[in-house]
Amino acid sequence: MTAAALIDVPLQSLDVVHALVTHKLKRPLADVSSLKSIKTLVGGKSTLQNEIVGDLHKEFGSRVPDKPEELSLQDLAAAIGAFGGGLGKHTQAQLARLFSNKMPGGFSLSSTRSVLQSAYGLGLQRQDALLLLALTMEPSSRLSGDAEAKAWLGTVAEAYAAKAGISYATASAGGGSSGQAGAPVISSAEVEEMQQKQHEHIRQQIQVLARYAGMDLREDARLAEDKHALIVGLQSKVDGILAELGDEYIDGVRPLFDARKARFFDSSWNWVRQEAYELTQQAIANCTSGFTSAPASIDDGSLQRLKNRSSLGLLQMLAGSLSILQAANDNSLEPAIKLVSELHSACELALNQPPVYRELSVPTGPHVDIGTDGTVAYSEVPRPDELSFAEFVKVMRQPVAQGMSPFIHLKKQSVGGVWSYCAELSATYYEGLGEICGSGLLFAGKTALVTGCGQGSIGADIVIGLLSGGAKVVATTSSYSRKTMLFFEDMYRTHGARGSELIVVPFNQGSTGDVKQLVDYIYRDSGAAKGLGWDLDYVIPFAAVTDSGGFATNLTSHSEYAQRILLINVMRLLGRIKDTKERLGYNTRASLVVLPLSSNHGNFGGDGLYGESKIGLETAFNRWMSESWQDYLSIAGAVIGWTRGTNLMTTNNIVAPQVEQLGVRTFSTREMAFTILALAHPRIRRLACHQPIWADLDGGMKNIVDYGIVISNARAALQSKVSLQQAMAREVALDYLAIDLRSHSKLDTVAEEKPLAKPKHHFPTPRHYGQLEHLRHLQGMVNLDKVVVVTGYGEVGPHGNAETRWEMEAYGEFSLEGCIELAWIMGLIKHFNGTLKATGAVYVGWVDAKTEEPIRDVDVKPRYEEFILAHTGIRLIEPEL
């Protein structure tokens, strides 16, 4: 029998938000109040808070307001607005994970929806609401069979009925009014009994015929039973492994490596010409526009990047540009002529010199500003007493305090195994740092492997330094996507020197298989699956994941997964490299391994097995001797200090100024990368061949007792200031409200203005006759009455028109204006001028073509860019077309 259908009701934004937050917190739905904010619910766990906010953005996109963690769940849902359509990407992915990991085979999401419709009479929207509730009632382990799964689903259905205030009704079996009155009625039980007897009779006849034909009807059944027993056994093992290790561990160790997806960037000769051309054209534009302060030179960093990529083709292009500018005989172009001449001279001198890594940027420090309304703004600002990295080195070699070692230094191991400050080794290290600021460090002909080099990481700045010096680098990424590739492409475009190469491959450091395949790919130089054929000079395994909230009393599968990345597979990586080099006979040049150590050995607390992993890496110093690594690997351990802006420390940025007041130095990612790259200096590398190097780069963090208490006190002090400022702002607002009832508050801020698109159409600037004087000798060569003159053109191609095509070719992405134009061309948006049906308000601007929802200019790119990129460019034609 089928349940009577219930009236379907639209899914509410609050249902999604509430379920999403509850699922992340791993609490029952009733224990998570929708009147509380995310910040309150997470109880100070900033990493968990950031993860929830990230999940909200995945689910709702640009509809999520600013600072959603400060709003109650009800206010947040109201700010997001009405929920249209089905579930979003994040909730769909979580439901798919739930059914694949916790339901028995065959009990799929589609079959569950069928049961909800037939047995409970729920429409599609109510099914979504029930499934969201199911996420918060996830079983602790895989359910054994359909009966147990249906019982669980029934429990969820009853919970949904209680929450939604509904009851399930079953339709009558009889059918009702049709037919003659008084006709005999046969019960369903009798019908089923008759069917069973009929089926039994047919089965007996089939058995008689099979025996006569000599056929064994049970053969396939016995084979199926054997297979079923095998499946049950394997499922039991899988369930046991899943129960023991957990979902996050199982999902986290899946391999990603695929040599076919390797992306190669090696065209520095091309990017340098484009950069030089843009500099030249910008200088010319400044001159012709009357911009009198046009620069006569470029900054040292940009000039060094051009010199690192100097080539004959670049010199020819600069020489040609210089000739054209000089032939124009225009005094206003003198600044541009001077700039191009300087570029040509500098690049000509650098042509026969190898590229070098020189750190020419400016050291920065943390700055926190509390606004009049209590908002906290964090920024990086130049340090007034350190205007260059040379001055940074001078400060860092000073003692933290009287009688203490310097902020950064090298240590030497004594006979008893104790590591202590070594002035001699540190002096050599400081000399290397100074050379990087001066003459530079060469990496030409060197090869390196860097893991954990995503955007905003220390590893990314290390890759930049290696590429600047001419190295060939394999960079790994666990988030292989177009966005990631554009990040690495831009990195190479800006910093890739002559002879350098950047190879980006997908890689999961949590996967043992990926570790083996990556090393084989780098060292293999023959065979069907040919690799790079390199022998690595540098190995920098910096991949890491956060494990916030992982206390000893509640270690999860994520903690074990994190330890696998931070420790276990780092050792596997080193072992695989050592074994491969030994097998190939590469025993004359040891690869320098830079291990990411830490002085946080459980001092912060609540960070899972991070401290244990870092202590475990220190055993590599002893293994270097006991396991005979000397001919193949050399070890340098870098005790990394407080580094602002990384994924591990970004939530602590706002308390960095207070921490520095305690005498600790915090670092930017560029500063930390600079101190680590100095370990690759030839003199340090030679020292590492004889003994492991311990580089203490923690900036004095080890001198702080009770990190956790210090950080908590700093946060509390900051929050006290914020609360005080907010209270003062409210009092001032109330004062003005009492004085002038027409004014809500003198401190009311103007609504944030979102930028409008600024379409540009680039037309060539017509020249006056004086500028064409040098072409007068052509006069009279042709009859102008018979010359065809094209005064305009049009273009339609895979990337739209000429403007949008040029954006993709020149910059690798569409601008806001380009996205608006393509969204309009593709029918995603349309221009509206009138009264909106939904609100009755007068509106002029873009609206969504399907829903007629108003769309701000600034929201077009984040909302439609993914669809535009998937349906533009050279590609396989979409099936629907």
Image: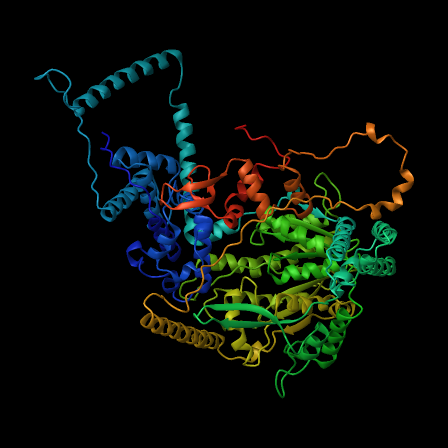
Q: Quadrant of the C terminus?
A: top right
Which residue occupies 40% across, 16% down?
215
197 up-or-down from 316: above or below:
above
596 up-or-down from 162: above or below:
below
Rendering coords of residue 720 (x, y %)? 41, 76
The extreme right residue here reads 777
| Total numbered labels | 0
Rendering coords of residue 782 (x, y %)? 88, 31
Rendering coords of residue 540 (x, y %)? 66, 60
Q: Quadrant of residue 362?
A: bottom right
Which residue occupies 51% across, 61% down?
546
Rendering coords of residue 645 (x, y %)? 57, 65
Front-most of residues 795 and 146: 795
Q: Quadrant of the N terminus?
A: top left
Which residue occupies 35% across, 57% down?
75
Front-most of residues 494 and 200: 494
Query: Is residue 254 visible in this depiction of the protein?
Result: yes
The extreme left residue here reads 182
* In this picture, residue 572 sits left or right of residue 390: left
659 up-or-down from 122: above or below:
below
Front-most of residues 877 and 755: 755
